[in-house]
Image: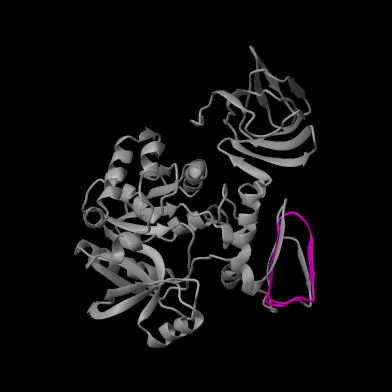
Amino acid sequence: MIPVILSGGSGTRLWPLSRGQYPKQFLPLVSSHTMLQETVRRLAGVANLKSPIAVCNEDHRFMMAEQLWEIGVKPSAIILEPVGKNTAPAVAMAALSALSEEDVLLVLPADHVIGDLMAFHQAIEQAATLAEQGFLVTFGIVPNAPETGYGYIKRDTVQLGEAYRVASFVEKPDLETAKRYLESGDYFWNSGMFAFTAGIFLKELEKFNPQMLAVCRQALKSAKVDMDFVRLDKTIFSACPSDSIDYTIMEKTDKAVVIPLDADWNDVGSWSALWDVTDKDSFGNAVSGDVLTVDTKNSYIYSENKLVAVIGVEDLIVVETKDAVMIAAKDRVQEVKQVVDQLKKLGRSEADIHRKVYRPWGHYDSVDSGERHQTKRIVVKPGAKLSVQKHHHRAEHWVVVKGTALVAKGDEKILITENESIYIPLGVVHCLENPGVIPLEIVEVQSGSYLGEDDIVRYGDQYGRV
């Protein structure tokens, strides 16, 4: 069995913590590990697992690789999507990458929470058996509330062990309909998790959407392999139809079965859902960071950077990051996406990036900015190196506060250590490298007429960035 980890989501409903360039699956929201890492770690103990295949946005490739490395997992491939095309093409790429059509693919979104691992593992074993018999298996979550935020799967009366034939897939219902679904006992929440052999999936895809399969084959054939990364051709993959596994195959095939899963599952799709799965105090408050509460109940309060004091409120979501504060009624958190939409229309960077921005070599934090200046705190990992570059509109002054920096400045190579500095004039080709064994920390002061991140002309980059 090959785990296929789908990590294409943007997690906009968990803004401002989750953003386009650093979405929720890469955040440690419910434990000390990120949601991606928890997705892989919870498979420990499942028999006959092969190395996973991960599918992610091209912009997230280094976060994916590093977070898997941190938990000691080496993927057989990290497939990079240049554009998002929903789940069916993503899984098609994984199926085409499998070594054998007989391999069972266990398809898992990277951003779910599952509390009962024993029940989950038992369901996986059942799914593997059914998949080997030629079925396309989905996992239906046994509902405990009339949830309107999920699609549903209706079971048929035909039973296959613990599983059922699928009667139909149902869109997100209104509240009254959801109540009827819950009372009937015939409906499950659609989890978006699947199991099937690579061969059966590809056969059904060819039957129901041959164009999608043809484009996927062509994109994979033209892909460039760089270490663990499989870089799909953007021009080819952009022509691929965009659809979910459900709509493309599962709603049309006669091979679909559903396994009921009662395992304390949550897709953490909103702040209220995160409140549900987070430990709470005696007043029902889930708090993180430097938080003080007075006469406050049933709220989620998150502080990243500042002291947050909350007084006399109930059923509230309060989230503070270094560059944004979001406050919402707990029953209206689905509307957070509207804020993100407004930010995008206004062209504001807060929709996609944090003040602290991660790069393959480390990260930087923009601590101050003005009309013609910007100050950053830059951290470079041991052995890492920024691209060889120059700027048309800004000069830079670097001060080392920790570690040692090897600086290429024009034709010079200069070693600078703590409390030493160097000036990089506008237009000079330069490069920053950490030759040491501890993180390099520098303060960078930029000055010039334009300070945007797109004022970079790269001459060389070990991470394959253009």
Q: Is residue 424 magenta?
A: no
Please determine whether, in this image, residue 406 is positioned above or below residue 167: above
For this orientation, the residue located farthest to the left is 133
| Residue 402 x/y as whole percent | 72, 34
Q: Identify the residue at horizontal 44%, vertical 41% (top origin).
A: 82
Q: Identify the residue at horizontal 54%, vertical 57% (top origin).
A: 11
Q: How many marks?
A: 0
| Residue 345 x/y as whole percent | 63, 50
Q: Quadrant of the N terminus?
A: bottom left
Q: Tell me: 116 left or right of 19.
A: left
Q: Tell me: 248 left or right of 419.
A: left
Please determine whether, in this image, residue 187 is positioned above or below residue 237: below
| Residue 63 x/y as whole percent | 52, 44
| Residue 68 x/y as whole percent | 47, 47
Q: Tell me: 183 left or right of 364.
A: left
Q: Quadrant of residue 301?
A: bottom right
Q: Identify the residue at horizontal 44%, vertical 78% (top origin).
A: 143
Work out whether residue 417 or residue 222 is closer to the camera in this orientation and state it: 222
For this orientation, the residue located farthest to the top is 411
Please determine whether, in this image, residue 118 is positioned above or below residue 454: below
Q: Tell me: 275 left or right of 141.
A: right
Can the viewer see residue 228 in this picture?
A: no
Q: Quadrant of residue 118?
A: bottom left
The magenta segment = 296-320
Please determine whether, in this image, residue 216 is positioned above or below residue 341: above
Q: Is residue 314 magenta?
A: yes
Can the viewer see residue 453 in this picture?
A: yes
